[in-house]
Image (cartoon, grey):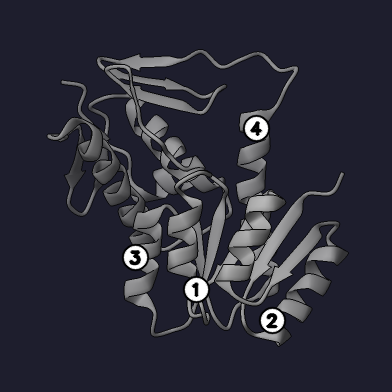
Amino acid sequence: MPQTIALVDDDRNILTSVTITLEAEGFAVRTYSDGAEALRGLTQQPVDLAVLDIKMPRMDGMELLEKLRKTSSLPVIFLTSKDDEVDELMGLRMGADDYIKKPFSQRLLIERIRSILRREESRNATGQTAEAAMMRGPLMMDPTRHLCTWDGRPIELTVTEFLLLKALAQRPGHVKSRDQLMDSAYGENIYVDDRTIDSHIKRLRKKFKAVIGEFNHIETLYGVGYRYKES
């Protein structure tokens, strides 16, 4: 069965051209011209990944992502225009996995989609030796089940957030540069802006603070990177 991508954009030209490219790459595609239509469709017929435009009528991409995140960890890539920097950051903090600016290279979009789907496949693969759960004090991460808890309380993380936290927590006290974290979360040969990593880290901190209140276990070393502090 081909993997299914949802395209949500009010620009018919983008829907048509990207659909042609994705289908040529072997994907199945479902298209929606606004967020309200997409929410109904994605609720009834789940897909493997969604590409969302931010600026849309009736329900924009931000509101759609917010509603999706209440019940789903569906991987999401945002499409943004050049003047949407605030929206990009907000989208990442809300749980988007990546963003691409318009006008964009369709080849770049395909690479980003494949990179995120590979992570999903690895996480959901069967018939492979299960990766052992990792314990770091009150933190527990189980990659096989994509489960993260703190003192037994679940923390809902996107794939990108999970991989970033795992990369940091594997070696407490050791600094990870943004480039190293980028490779851990996106794979080699995929470049994302430093700001993207920073936004994911902010989102991680916010999710933990919402559950446990005070959380200071992810430290920023300005100009260097991040590290996980176990105690």
Q: Amino acid at mark 1?
A: Met
Residue shown at 37% from the left, 53% from the top: 197
- Badge 2, how many Cα within 10 Å: few under 14, some, many 20+? few
Count the numbered circles shown.
4
Q: Which residue is mark 2?
A: 14
State which tag comes first along the sequence, 1 or 2: 2
Secondary element under disc 2, as helix, strand or loop, is: helix
* Front position among marks 4 and 3: 3
- Check if mark 3's residue and mark 2's residue have beta carbons within 8 Å: no
Q: Which quadrant of the rendered structure holds the C terminus?
A: top left
State which tag comes first along the sequence, 2 or 4: 2
Above or below 23: residue 122: above
The reply to whether residue 47 is visible in this rendering is no
Secondary element under disc 3, as helix, strand or loop, is: helix
- Badge 4, how many Cα within 10 Å: few under 14, some, many 20+? few
* Front position among marks 1 and 2: 1
Residue shown at 51% from the left, 53% from the top: 68
* Residue 181 on image: x %, y %: 40, 44
Q: Amino acid at mark 2?
A: Ile
Q: How far apart in space, not on screen, are marks 1 and 4 (Cα)?
A: 33 Å
Q: Amino acid at mark 4?
A: Ser
Q: How far apart in space, not on screen, are marks 4 and 3 (Cα)?
A: 27 Å
State which tag comes first along the sequence, 3 or 2: 2
Q: Which residue is mark 3?
A: 89
Secondary element under disc 4, as helix, strand or loop, is: helix
Q: How far apart in space, not on screen, are marks 1 and 3 (Cα)?
A: 19 Å
Q: Which residue is mark 1?
A: 59
Q: Which residue is mark 4?
A: 122
| Residue 191 or residue 52, whichever sits in front | 52
